Image: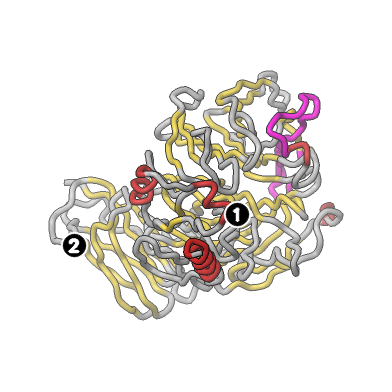
Amino acid sequence: MRQTLTILACLAFAVSLAAQQPPELEDSGPGVNFLTPTIDLDLQSVPLVVPEQFARWVPDRELQLPEGFKASVFAAPGLMGPRFMDWSPDGILHVANMKVNGGEWSPKHDTSEPPVRNEMFAQIVALPDDDNDGVADTALVVADRLWFPHSLQFYQGDLFVADMHQVVRLRDLDGDGFYENETVVIGDLPTGHHRTRTILFDEGEDKLYLSIGSSCDLCREADERRATILQSDPDGANLKVYARGLRNAIGMAFHPLTRQLWITGNGHDREGKHLPPEVVTIVKDGGFYGWPVAYGYQVPTNTGINQYADAILPLTRQDTLDMESMVRPAVQVYAHLAPMAIHFYHNNSVSELDGAALVAMRGGGRDAEGHKVVAIFTNPDGSDARVGDFVTGFEAGDDPWGKPVGLATDGAGNIYLSSDWNTNMIVRIEPAAHPTAVEEDVGLEAPGGFALLQNHPNPFNSSTTLRYILSRIGAVELSVYDMQGQLVRGLVQEVQNAGRYEITWAGDNDAGQPVATGTYLTRLQAAALVQTRKVMLIK
């Protein structure tokens, strides 16, 4: 009887936790559920411009974007489940057309065995815009006979595709625009539940990264490749588990300054509408990130839920050591938002977004609006994060009309966002026309007149002058970081009026000690506005 009462008490406690939304916390200790503090990017309703030739595929809608941004449909006909995207060496956007086999949950894909070869016809599609009018001229199938391709990347002139059961390298040997030559780079991947595979190349280290989701909502895996990120050479050699405990790390991107690997993580399903928070964080070689025994910052999975108790109990000594090794995630957002692609945005003329991470949210937040894109502002090491809605408007009642998945940008700073269901399309988001931050004559009256100017002299020996412009009164932070994202020197942390400012940095740290020769990052933040610049110290 006492054991029954104890179990009921645990279940009641679990239900009470699941009914509570975690608080927004700037910092927290282990075992605490939290959400990253939010900021308001002052979104405005703008019409989604639909070219006449696409009107049959895309309804008239409005989106909410920061002031000055515009949205139009770049591509629609010929797309069925467009997922992740990449640019070819000749500047043509390519997309994984994942659901050509039919439906969002085709029975044919719910088996653990591949379909008959002649039934495979998912595709990679090229979307040329030869006249540069912001609208794809056509949708060209450049590779097919694929099973369930989710992501692709061009690397050293070849097209690599992450299919559900393998990673392949594709080449166009006869120059007809179709990639007919296929080489399996990594084969015999586990199939079934969590079928998408994400591929990413680190050009500096010449390494391939591949994320593989779990085989279940929550369980002990028999295959060590499940719920991990794998690393190999570009040809698939030296394959190893790079990071584990990741239930479904769909998005991967390298930070442009620190080159650390950032991922988006999708949490388990049965702890209620508020738990666990979805995660965006940095992963490192050998790191453990919770699944299935924990999540977030060392928060244990709720074993008061019968299915979870059966799946993971009893806990082992290794489980305890793994949980103790878990670091605090950089970002946590509402549960069940299903974060997809992560993309670090760079455009000096868009000071509000430069250096921010954009994340596509394919799911609904239940108590929060989902089916959107958020912008994440952090220090280079992932600390001091803030999250703001950047694109909303895909929800219309209980049934979203678009599901954001993939993100890419072109050289002009235009953002491309794929929607893979209900409306199959790629939306082109044009940035507001702000002046470039490197212009010396940026005026305070100009829109977005917030700028961190290049230091002078650069390179420098004993000291250098850092200059910046503020367009409004507010709290300001100006700091110096090393290339690993570690804070070196805090220079400004106070409320300042609009105006131009200068401050001298003598190449020292917060303890007043000289720092070594090398490249450093200066970072200016005022509310949601962030800019970063490189400075070089030579002794």
What residue is disc 2 on?
Answer: 510
* Residue identifier under label 1: 414
In the rendered structure, the answer to whether residue 321 lies left or right of residue 337 reads: left
Q: How many marks?
A: 2
Q: Residues within 10 Å of mark 1 (few under 14, many from 20)?
A: many
State whether residue 120 is above or below residue 452.
above
Q: Quadrant of residue 509?
A: bottom left
Q: Residue at x 56, y 66 (%)?
A: 274
- Camera-nearest residue between 348 and 368: 368
Residue 457 located within the stretch drawn in magenta: no
Dot 1 or dot 2: first in sequence order is 1
Q: Residues within 10 Å of mark 2 (few under 14, many from 20)?
A: few
SS for dot 2: loop
> Residue 126 location, x and y as percent?
70, 38
- From this view, report whether residue 312 is shown above or below residue 172: below
Please state if 514 lies on the left or on the right of 312 as rendered. left
Q: For residue 431, what is the image quadrant?
A: bottom right
Image coordinates of residue 307 in percent, x first then y, are 58, 52
Of helix, strand and loop, which one carries label 1? loop
- Identify the image quadrant of residue 142: top right
Q: Residue at x 43, y 72 (%)?
A: 527
Residue 239 can be seen in this image: yes
Marks 1 and 2, how far apart at CA? 39 Å
Query: Outermost residue, right direction?
Result: 56
Magenta residue span: 110-139
Residue 181 percent location from the top left of the image = 66, 20
Q: Which mark is residue 456?
A: none
Three-letter residue code for mark 2: Asp
Of residues 435 and 36, the one drawn nearer to the viewer in this rendering:
36
The residue at 74%/28% (across/down) is 145
Q: Amino acid at mark 1?
A: Asn
